[in-house]
Amino acid sequence: MPDIDGLLYIRFLTYNDQEALEVLFNKFRDGLILFLYGCVQNEDVAEELMMDTFAILASGTTCYKENDEASFKTWLFAVAKNQALLYLRKWKRRFISQRKEFLNSVEADVCFHPVAELLKNERDAQLYKAMKSIDSDYRQALFLLYFENMKPEQISRIIKKNIKQTYNILARGKESLRAAYERMGRTWNLLGI
């Protein structure tokens, strides 16, 4: 039986229930933008790709199938990642290094930075900042783990790796993140991860 989000999507497709789609949009919009930003390193493009993802959902071009193995959220993030990959291929870009300045402007003026508004607390902001300097594969998997609270099985479907590879990516990513966090002068133990 599909999860509640899957049922909402099925209700939208079956009965053209716009409120169901709106609930899904409001629930997943911010997380998708942050995830997509990690892929394309551009806020405007990330927002556009999030909208494209929901346009695909609304059009029914690709449909979520009731499946015990994958939740609607897992399927949605996989669709979003595919949109990011298509964008990057189209513009012949590779995943950009996270070393670019991103949160410096956030630290100066949190209120006016769109992505900073999504990172509502200090822990999330520091964690996201530390994630800038690690490998993009690690960053994507850890974002899904820490910010979207996904299980490794769900993450493996999105990043298209088997479960053992996913656990390895998560372990290596955590070690890289710990080192990045400590380079920032933070204590890893206080992070509670």
Image (cartoon, helix red, strand yellow):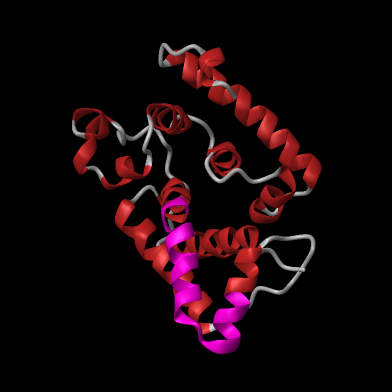
In the rendered image, which quarter contains the C terminus?
A: top right
Residue drawn at (47%, 32%) of the image: 131
Identify the main secondary structure in magenta.
Answer: helix
Above or below, 158 against 187 in this view is below
The quadrant where residue 157 appears: bottom right
Above or below, 177 against 152 in this view is above
Is residue 180 found left or right of 144 in the rendered image? left
Horizontal and vertical percent for residue 177? 54, 25
Residue at the far bottom: name it: 15
Magenta-highlighted residues: 9-31
Q: Is residue 61 visible?
A: no
Is residue 153 found left or right of 72 in the rendered image? right
Residue drawn at (45%, 53%) of the image: 36
Residue drawn at (41%, 64%) of the image: 49
The quadrant where residue 88 appears: bottom left
Above or below, 179 against 22 in this view is above
The quadrant where residue 93 appears: bottom left
Residue 138 is inside the magenta segment: no
Horizontal and vertical percent for residue 29? 43, 59
142 or 29, nearer to the observer: 29
